[in-house]
């Protein structure tokens, strides 16, 4: 692996409060040194990072660029159909090699000095290697086999391509664990088609979004559309499932089981008692594609992957740190190739629920920046995360809990060594 110019500190950078995962020191959201260590220890460490979907590189020669933390990545499918991932950094002087989000090419050529790589990242040729008319060129000991694009290990599950830099990372199935794999397959193990994509910049540390997508407490309070139109509320049956190590989670709700709770009748919970109706009620006319009555689900894979099925709107998101207080959030809206035209139309229409301007998601674009702005001058203060208890355990009878948020911090502290 590469030598790094940022030395890894011998002492942990963060003193974690004694209460453990029920507290998070605000320092971790705005400390540049912590951010640098996360790149090394988490993103280039023992985790499987989401890279792309197999459907985006369906054919030989397909190329998709992506990110592992700050590191730009190229994912390819070669002539034999094998998937490869490598750092998007030329072995000559480090220029980006692939410049487009998606492409189809017979090989990869760097625009700077035209070094050319096979689809597996090995070096084909260096331009003017032998000089011109016997003059110039590379030294005699130049060996193309010693220069290549730095590879990542790759594994796939349910059409999702993951990559890791670390030899320490356990096999993908072990990393995900049984309940996470089962639910991911429920939603994703179908012939997928992409209905649309976009990304948005959110002005907060990446971990605030990692918390936010695990935060089943806020969803039916902040997102008033959910509450008003009874799409997803805490007074529906639902639950939280954590992976064995607690790093990943599933949150689900069953819309048909709504029994209005007194809590929603109070003035404090805005919009719950509005007497509102949609002018276009067909927006929420979902069909039931499964036999488990689950109508809303959100699932995470540590550190930065999310899969969601909100009514019939299927999407994956992943969020990429762009600095200590800036994150790019990517959305990919999906359907199944077996969908009827009416079902595709419904999925596209329900795509309005989530995404950057989504009826139940747009608030997340600003709420995390409110936390960033509220906390950045208080590195010594910590959040209080005790809804549903102080530990991180699955709870299949209530989502009035922050267990999944605490689960994220289990993984974070373990990898970062913040005890
Ligand atoms: S930097 Fe890529 S060929 Fe020179
Ligand atoms: Fe949210």
Image (cartoon, rainbow, N blue to C red):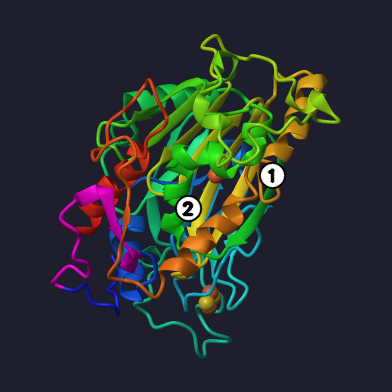
Name the foreground residue: 229 vs 195. 229
Name the foreground residue: 365 vs 278. 278
Mark 2 is surrounded, within 10 Å at the Cα level, by few (under 14), some (14 to 19) or many (20 or more) other residues, namely: many
Element at label 2 = helix
Residue 358, label in figure: 1
Farthest front residue in view: 267
Residue 209, label in figure: 2
Residue sitting at x 71%, y 49%: 357
Start and end of the magenta stretch?
A: 10-28
Which quarter of the figure is the N terminus placed in? bottom left
Residue 208 falls in which quadrant of the image? bottom left
Q: Is residue 129 left or right of residue 9?
A: right
Residue 273, x across and y down, in percent: 66, 31
Residue 116, x across and y down, in percent: 55, 65
Residue sitting at x 74%, y 30%: 275
Farthest right residue in view: 279
Residue 274, label in figure: none
The answer to if 21 sits in the magenta stretch is yes
Residue 375, x across and y down, in percent: 41, 67
Residue 82 seen anywhere in this rendered image of the structure: no
- In this rendering, is residue 58 above or below 153? above
CA gap, disc 1 to disc 2? 16 Å
């Amino acid at each position: 692996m590469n030598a790094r110019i940022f030395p890894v500190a011998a002492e942990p950078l963060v003193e974690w409060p004694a209460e453990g995962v029920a507290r998070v020191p605000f320092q971790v959201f705005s400390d540049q040194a912590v951010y640098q260590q996360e790149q090394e220890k988490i993103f280039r460490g023992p985790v499987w990072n989401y890279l792309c979907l197999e459907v985006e590189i369906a054919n030989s020669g397909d190329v998709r660029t992506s990110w592992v933390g700050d590191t730009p990545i190229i994912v390819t499918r070669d002539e034999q159909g094998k998937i490869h991932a490598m750092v998007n950094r030329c072995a000559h002087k480090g220029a980006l090699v692939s410049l487009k989000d998606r492409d189809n090419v017979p090989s990869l050529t760097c625009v700077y000095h035209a070094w050319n790589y096979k689809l597996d990242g090995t070096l084909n040729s260096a331009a003017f290697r032998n000089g011109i008319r016997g003059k110039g060129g590379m030294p005699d000991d130049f060996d193309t086999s010693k220069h290549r694009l730095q590879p990542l290990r790759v594994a796939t599950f349910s059409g999702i391509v993951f990559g890791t830099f670390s030899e320490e990372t356990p096999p993908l199935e072990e990393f995900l664990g049984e309940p996470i794999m089962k639910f991911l397959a429920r939603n994703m193990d179908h012939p997928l088609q992409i209905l649309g994509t976009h990304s948005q910049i959110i002005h907060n540390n990446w971990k605030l979004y990692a918390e936010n997508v695990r935060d089943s407490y806020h969803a039916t309070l902040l997102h008033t559309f959910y509450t008003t139109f009874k799409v997803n509320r805490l007074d529906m049956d639902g639950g939280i499932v954590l992976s064995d190590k607690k790093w990943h989670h599933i949150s689900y709700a069953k819309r048909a089981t709504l029994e209005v709770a007194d809590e929603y009748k109070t003035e404090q919970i805005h919009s719950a008692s509005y007497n509102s109706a949609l002018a276009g009620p067909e927006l929420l006319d979902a069909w039931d594609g499964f036999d488990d009555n689950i109508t809303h689900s959100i699932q995470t894979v540590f550190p930065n992957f999310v899969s969601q099925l909100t009514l019939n709107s299927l999407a994956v998101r992943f969020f990429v740190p762009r600095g200590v207080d800036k994150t790019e959030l990517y959305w990919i809206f999906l359907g199944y190739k077996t969908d009827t035209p009416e079902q595709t139309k419904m999925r596209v229409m329900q795509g309005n629920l989530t995404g950057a301007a989504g009826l139940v998601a747009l608030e997340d674009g600003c709420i995390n920046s409110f936390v960033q702005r509220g906390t950045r001058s208080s590195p010594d203060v910590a959040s209080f995360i005790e809804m549903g208890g102080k530990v991180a355990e699955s709870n299949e009878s209530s989502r009035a809990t922050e267990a999944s948020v605490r689960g994220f911090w289990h993984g974070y502290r373990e990898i970062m060594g913040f005890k």
